[in-house]
């Protein structure tokens, strides 16, 4: 059993576990077809959404933990995967209230 645990903890596996969420920077490596499968929208639609949201998102106060692109990905994964905000928040390493605020802000923007 110990041998199994030692073999599973390879650097690649640890990197995968460390970065379970799909960051915007990581999603840039996806083809248009893969990105559409992951989010439900195409790259041009994603960029259009981000550009439109930049006009409506307030730039005052403390800087957000997630970039606007990551916030959009958080909402898209919430809508696409039908997971609870608790699980989405854990994937993006934010609290559940933060994920809820992001979702509410982007939904009403």
Image: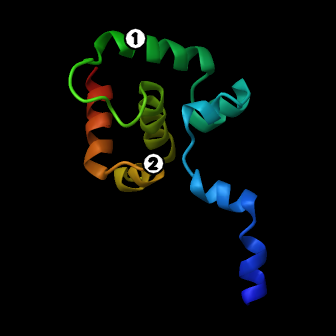
Q: Nearer the viewer, residue 43 or 90?
A: 90
Residue 64 spot, x, y in % from top left: 33, 32
Residue sitting at 20 percent across and 25 percent down?
Answer: 61
Above or below, 20 against 29 in this view is: below
Residue 46 spot, x, y in % from top left: 53, 20
Residue 103 spot, x, y in % from top left: 32, 36
Q: Which residue is mark 1?
A: 52
Q: Quadrant of residue 98?
A: top left
Residue 87 spot, x, y in % from top left: 42, 55
Closer mark to the observer between disc 2 and disc 1: 1
Above or below, 53 against 78 in this view is: above
Q: Are marks 2 and 1 in contact (CB under 8 Å)?
A: no
Horizontal side of 22 relative to 69 (left or right) equals right
Horizontal side of 26 relative to 109 (left or right) equals right
Above or below, 12 against 61 in this view is: below
The N terminus lies in quadrant = bottom right
Horizontal side of 14 relative to 76 (left or right) equals right
Color scheme of the displayed model: rainbow
Residue sitting at 41 percent across and 25 percent down?
Answer: 68
Q: Most extreme residue toward the bottom, as rendered?
A: 1
Horizontal side of 80 relative to 55 (left or right) equals right
Q: Residues within 10 Å of mark 2 (few under 14, many from 20)?
A: few
Residue sitting at 59 percent across and 14 percent down?
Answer: 44
Query: Quick one: SS at disc 1?
Result: helix
Q: Which residue is mark 2?
A: 82
Query: Quick one: SS at disc 2?
Result: loop
C-alpha span from label 2 to label 1: 25 Å
- Of labels 2 and 1, earlier in sequence is 1
Q: Most extreme residue toward the left, as rendered?
A: 61
Above or below, 13 against 29 in this view is: below
């Amino acid at each position: 059993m110990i041998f199994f645990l030692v073999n599973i903890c390879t650097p690649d596996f640890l990197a995968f576990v460390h970065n379970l969420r799909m960051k915007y920077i990581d999603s840039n490596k996806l083809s248009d077809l893969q990105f559409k499968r992951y989010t439900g929208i195409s790259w041009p639609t994603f960029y259009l959404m981000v550009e439109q949201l930049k006009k409506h998102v307030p730039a005052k106060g403390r800087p957000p933990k997630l970039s606007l692109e990551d916030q959009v990905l958080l909402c898209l994964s919430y809508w696409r995967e039908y997971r609870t905000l608790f699980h989405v928040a854990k994937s993006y390493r934010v609290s559940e209230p933060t994920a809820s605020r992001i979702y509410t802000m982007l939904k009403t923007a």
